[in-house]
Image: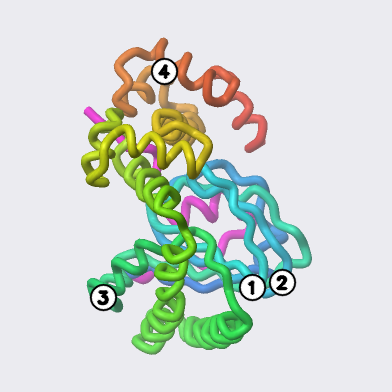
Amino acid sequence: METTPRLIDPTAFQKAYIRQPFEEVSRPDYFQIVRVEQVASRLVVPTLLYRTTYTYLVFLTQGEGRQLHNLDEVKIDAQRLLLVRAGTITAIQAIQSPVAGFFIGFDPIVLERLLSPIQLQQWLALPAVLPLTAGDIAWCSGLCHLLADEQAHGALTDAALHLLAGLVIKLLPKATLENTWMSREEQLATQFKQLVYMHCIQRKDLAFYADALAISENYLFRCVKTATGKVPKTILLETLVLYARVQLQNTTTDIATIAYSLNVQDPSYFGRLFRKVTGQTPSDYRRSMQDLSG
């Protein structure tokens, strides 16, 4: 029976990585805005990998940070906002102090209530890192301060929801801008990676992804190789290993079970694949993560 990579909810993340956790979220719809400067010193960095069940934005007004976003390491600062959607495998790599700004976390279903179908498509097309103009920064800063004030009332109010909608809608045009400067090869490579993140456990055949993108396997190969420097199969296997790394942090699950959960029926092959991608055996990786977490 298939099992998915270990998910981590907001409360579990706080307990695992923040020495003094945020106030407990008791509302049925998760929504939270936190000032980064109030918690940055309490974050245990680098964090372990986790797969988030909620969506969040990080808007820095000072300082910078580095974060793993699926297979890519991204950098954010006062001119670049971070978007992490639910289901993303991520880890905070570094924070450069002094740092200030806002963390805005919310249940993905919130956007289904606030956005039209076309706006939702734009939202899904947004990249992980959004460049901000001076006007964007002023807008985001003002809205985040208003959201923080509204959140102080202790309830998910209609005003807070509409402020969040305003912030998200302000960012949506960047989906079009992203596609404007990206080449055809880069667009297809990005779409391919998104499909891989969703389907790599069940579908390891490149024909599936080529069909989903309505292109030939040869054209998929050329586009991905041109845009990323890697062949499609490498990205697929690296993503599968990324999912395995999340599960290996759970020391109660044996390695063979992890291999089976990823639809790899030969644990020996799984071990060889993992070592080829990471340079470590699954057991060595697990031990190194235990050392990191103390």
Residue 244 placement (x, y as % from top left): 44, 30
Q: How far apart are marks 3 and 4 (CA)?
A: 41 Å
Label 2 or label 4, whichever comes before in sequence order = 2
> Given contact means CB atoms under 8 Å apart, are the residues at marks 1 and 2 in contact?
yes
Q: In this view, does 178 lie above or below 282?
A: below
Image quadrant in which you'd find residue 211? top left
The disc placed on residue 63 is none
The disc placed on residue 62 is 2
Q: Distance between the residues labelled 1 and 3?
A: 26 Å
Q: Give the residue drawn at x 26%, y 71%.
A: 112
The disc placed on residue 270 is 4
Q: What residue type is labelled 1?
A: Gly
The disc placed on residue 101 is 1
The disc placed on residue 113 is 3
Q: Give the residue drawn at x 57%, y 42%.
A: 48
- Range of the magenta residues? 1-28
Residue 15 placement (x, y as % from top left): 54, 52
Q: Is residue 8 above or below residue 182?
A: above
